[in-house]
Image (cartoon, rainbow, N blue to C red):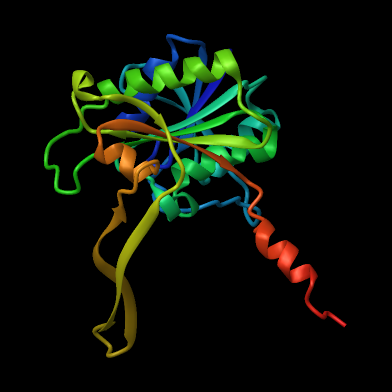
Amino acid sequence: MHILVTNDDGVSAPGLLALAQAMRTVGEVTVFAPDRNWSVSGHVKTLDRPLRVREVRLADGSPALATDGAPSDCVALALMGLVEEVDLVVSGINPHANLGHDVTYSGTVTAAMEAVITGGVPGIAFSLDSPEDYGGELDYGPAANLARRVVAQVIARGLPKGVLLNVNIPYLEAGDVKGFMVTRQGMRVYRDVLERRLDPRGRPYYWIGGESPTGIAEPGTDFGALAEGYVSITPLQLDLTAYKALEAMKAWDWD
C-alpha cells in the first residue's frame, strides 16, 4: 500500500508531519506538499506556468517533495507519473475543521478530490476542529491516531468509485472522543463583511472580513457529530448534478 500524503498548509506544517508518521504504520509513504500555505485556495490546477519540484526534509528528518504549485497540483503531478503507483491519497491534518460548504473552499479537501479526478484512487481529507482562539501549539497526536484507524478501514473495505471522504476530528483527548459517525454535510453559516478602505493615495480597496463562520449542529451532520464529541466522516461525490431539478427542467417548454 503506497500512500501519498499532502496538505494545503505547506510542507513544514506540523499536521502534515503527524499524518505522515501515522501513515507509515500502515503503508509506504511519499510526502508531496506545497512549499507555502494555500489555505482556502479551493480547487486549483496550475496550467499557465511551469511547476518546480524539489526535495526537502521534514522536521523528523524524513524526505519529502515540495512544489510551488497548489495542493491539487501536488496530487496531479504525483498521479500523472512523478510518484509511482499511488494507492491512496490522504490530505491534512488541517488545523481547523472543514464543514458544510467549506469543502468547496478547502485546499485540504480539494486535494483529496484531485485523487479521484486524476487517478481514480481513494482520497481522504483530515481536519482538526481546534478552537478558533487556541493560543498554544496544537497536539495532532490523537487526531493522527484516529486518522490511521479511518485509513485502515478504507484499505480493508475500499470506497465506491468517485467517492472521497471528508473527515473532521474533534479537538479532544483520545479517551474523550466518543467514536466515529458517518454523516452528511451540514449547514455552514458565513458571517462575511465587505470592508471598503482607502490606500495612502486615496484609491479604494476591499477586504472580506467579518466574524468566524458558525454552523447548525443538526443530528446526523458533520456539525452535529463534532458537537457530540464524535469523529465526522462524510462521503462526498463529484457529481454535483441536482437530479430533482434535472427532471423538473426537462418538462420546461424549451422550444
Please state which of residues 244 and 151 is positioned toward the viewer in this rendering.
244
- The residue shown at (39%, 49%) is 39
Q: Where, by quadrant of the figure, is residue 123 drawn?
A: top right
The quarter of the picture where the C terminus appears is: bottom right
Please, which residue is most extreme toward the left here? 135
Question: Which of these two is toward me, 165 or 44?
Answer: 165
Q: 85 and 238: which one is in front? A: 238
Q: Residue at x 28, y 88 (%)?
A: 201
Name the residue located 42 percent from the left edge and 9 percent from the top edge. 25
The image shows residue 31, relative to residue 69, as above or below, that is: above
- Residue 90 is left or right of residue 198, and the answer is right
**Horizontal side, residue 169 vs residue 78: left or right:** left
- Residue 52 figure quarter: top right
Q: Position of residue 206 (x, y in %)?
A: 33, 78
Q: Residue furthest bottom?
A: 202
Q: Is residue 21 visible?
A: yes
Whether residue 58 is visible, yes or no, is no
Residue 175: give x, y in percent of width and height: 20, 18
Q: How many marks?
A: 0
Q: Residue shown at 45%/47% (left/top)?
A: 185
Residue 44 versus residue 226 in the image, above or below: below
x and y percentages locating residue 215 in the rendered image: 31, 54
Does residue 56 sit above or below 115 in this rendering?
above
Percent of width and height locating residue 170: 27, 34
